[in-house]
Amino acid sequence: MISRSACVLVGGASRRMGRDKALLDVDGLPAYQRSANLLVECGFESVTLIGGDGSRFANAPHESDRVPGLGPLGGIGRALEIADPVFVFAVDLHGLDRMSLSVLLEAGSPEHDVTHARSGGVPQPLLGWWGGKAASVIEHSLRDGRRSVFDALDVLRVRAIDLPGDPIRNINRPDDLG
């Protein structure tokens, strides 16, 4: 992919976790900072946090959701307003390193609207390239009251890339931290 822009989705309510997932300590840094640092290490020139209240992030580039409460699909739509294509990274996906991401970063192509990760056989559409007609599909979905990322994927040209090993841990509950 040609884009050098990435967005970290940080707008979740973290209800199951009971505290802000973007601020969880990951390797001695808040999760949002570790995610942004990893993306910069991978060569992204622009990394923007998307969603929620930006005052909780220490001087990091941040954009609020255009319309709060639309979930990850709304966050991806907002990211596509910043860059198209854009690399999307959910802040609650832990365990990734530069080597894990390299396969995915090189796999984006104009033939696909979305090129996302698959880890351990589980699709991870909140980790990957979004572009092409994704912005218009997301806009129509949200306008029609549909907020499912997977429903949007059903009408897009999608490619899933298996990451080597099983590098992704999705952190949703306190038990997931151990």
Image: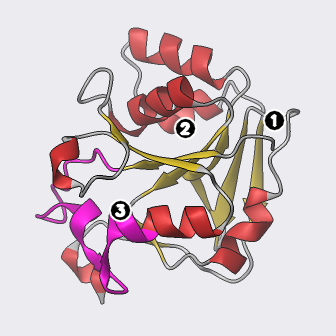
Q: Where is residue 53 in the image (x, y as percent from the top left)?
A: 18, 41
Q: Residue furthest left?
A: 18
Numbered disc total: 3
First to last magenta residue range: 10-34
The kind of secondary structure element at disc 1 is loop
Q: In which quarter of the image is the C terminus?
A: bottom left
Asked whether, in this view, residue 84 is left or right of residue 64, the answer is right
- Numbered tag placed on residue 32 in the rendering: 3
The type of residue carrying mark 2 is Phe
Q: Earlier in the sequence, mark 2 or mark 1?
A: 1
Determine the CA span between mark 1 and mark 3: 27 Å
Q: Which of marks 3 and 2 is nearer the N terminus?
A: 3
Determine the CA span between mark 2 and mark 1: 15 Å
- Residue highlighted by disc 1: 112
Nearest-to-viewer mark from 3 and 2: 3
| Residue at x 72%, y 40% (from the top left corner) | 3
Please determine whether, in this image, residue 70 is positioned above or below residue 161: above
- Numbered tag placed on residue 7 in the rendering: none
Please determine whether, in this image, residue 99 is positioned above or below residue 91: below
- Numbered tag placed on residue 150 in the rendering: 2
